[in-house]
Image (cartoon, grey):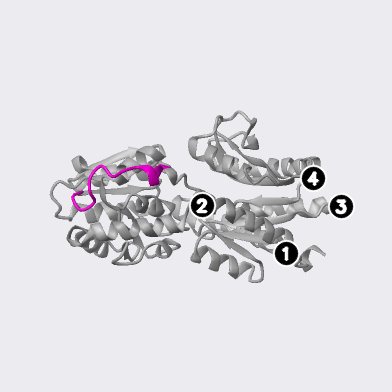
Amino acid sequence: MSGSKITVCWVSSARYRHPLNAVDARKWRLLAEMRDYEFRVIGFSSSLRPRRFHEGARFYLLPQASISPLRYLSMFALAPILLAYLALRYRGRIIVAQSPFEGAIGAAVKGFLRIFGLRPRLIVENHNNFEEDLFMQRQVPLEGLYRRLMLAAARYAFRHADALRVISTSTSERARHYAPSLPQARFMTFSDTDVFRRMARTIPVEEAVDIVYAGVLIPRKGVHYLLKAFARLDAPGAQLHLVGKAENGDYAAALRKQAAELGISERVHFCGAVSQAKLARYFAGARVMVLPSLSEGLGRVVVEAMLLGTPVIGSRVGGIPDLIVPGETGLLVEAGDEAELLEALKQIYRADVKAMGTAARAFALEYFSPEKYVDGYRQLFELATENTRTNQAQS
């Protein structure tokens, strides 16, 4: 503990740059407003250079290798040492692991700290379908072995956790499968929604014709199905904007090739990664946002689009059905069903999208705010520190 504050040691494979980008900076400034806590964050640097700095929280960033297996190796080799040091040096009382895999690191360090009389509480977060999502994003060498190691790490984390943070009905159910008796707090991942709340629409939704997809370009997002449906859509003047980082370069190249083969290259725009403000402008000029994912923890872009009064078409997977009321705020389709997606797009051009957009914005305003995000963590920390469950595996 530093002074009278409770030290929270945070371990994540997230990448941070210095200075922080606008969204991360806002998030950590808000969390820092919880005056009873101080945060020490382990993550990855944006380069091979390790970094240490203070910006809302105190960051200890590992060098980021360019190859995924090396990043995982460095995380599991270096993060436990750093986490144990920080917890000992600053008397850490809470460990937050931002996935079940980092949770295994937290669980191991938690057991080690008992030697020194420390008993920190471990919070394990579950943001997605951790059992399958990685394998839906890219090909993984030695997939069978990799899968067994990942699941073993996750089971170990859940067995030693004191509380869970989930973001949707589906992530809650998966966490319950592994840890049925642990208390849970459920709230959305952070979004700087003030940007979307303040932005005015550039064109009324009922007059707009463009379609926006927002998210990284990886196979799990199902963008190839959207291209097929868009190619068959009879909507004069409609443009499709694919907004997001080409995280899987091979997949992004395949999408460009697909657009050319379908004869829609001139109407499909690969916009790359953009700021929150620019993303809001895309939503402000769109008739609909489409999220055709094959798997999705929640899909915060759904909420962000709705804040601009933009209806959403989403796949009936993961947490997306938590956010969309079919026919009222958008439409739901079966993942990977090109024909149903096409019908949903057609319906959007016939529907009363003005009413849909109004309902969507009202829902989004109620569902999330930065203040609710901070309150979610405050409740989560209280759950973790109040939970006195005895774990037989630790005895």
Of the 4 image quadrants, the one containing the N terminus is: top right
* Residue behind mark 2: 189
In the image, the segment drawn in magenta is 195-208
Disc 1: CA contacts within 10 A as few (<14), some (14-19) or many (>=20): some
**Label 1 – label 2 distance at C-alpha:** 23 Å
Q: CA distance from mark 3 to mark 1?
A: 18 Å
Identify residue type, mark 1: Asn
Residue 386 in the image: x percent, y percent?
A: 73, 62
Disc 4 packing (10 Å; few <14; some 14–19; many ≥20): many
Depth check: 193 or 248 in front? 193
Q: Quadrant of residue 172?
A: bottom right
Q: CA distance from mark 1 to mark 4?
A: 19 Å
Residue type of the residue flagged with mark 4: Arg
Badge 2: how crowded within 10 Å, few (<14), some, or many (20+)? some
Q: Nearer the viewer, residue 281 or 319?
A: 281
Q: Which mark is residue 91?
A: 4
Q: Which corner quadrant of the image does residue 260 belong to? A: top left
User: Is residue 205 within the magenta segment?
Assistant: yes
Mark earlier in primary sequence (3, 1): 3
Q: CA distance from mark 3 to mark 4?
A: 10 Å
Label number found at residue 117: 3
Mark nearer the N terminus (2 vs 3): 3
Under mark 2, the amino acid is: Thr
Question: Foreground mark, 3 or 1?
Answer: 1
Q: Is residue 226 magenta?
A: no
| Element at label 4 | loop
Q: From the viewer's perspective, is 196 left or right of 110?
A: left
Identify the residue shown where x is 58% and y is 39%: 29
Name which of mark 2 and mark 4 comes first in the sequence.
4
Mark 1 or mark 2: whose residue is earlier in sequence:
2
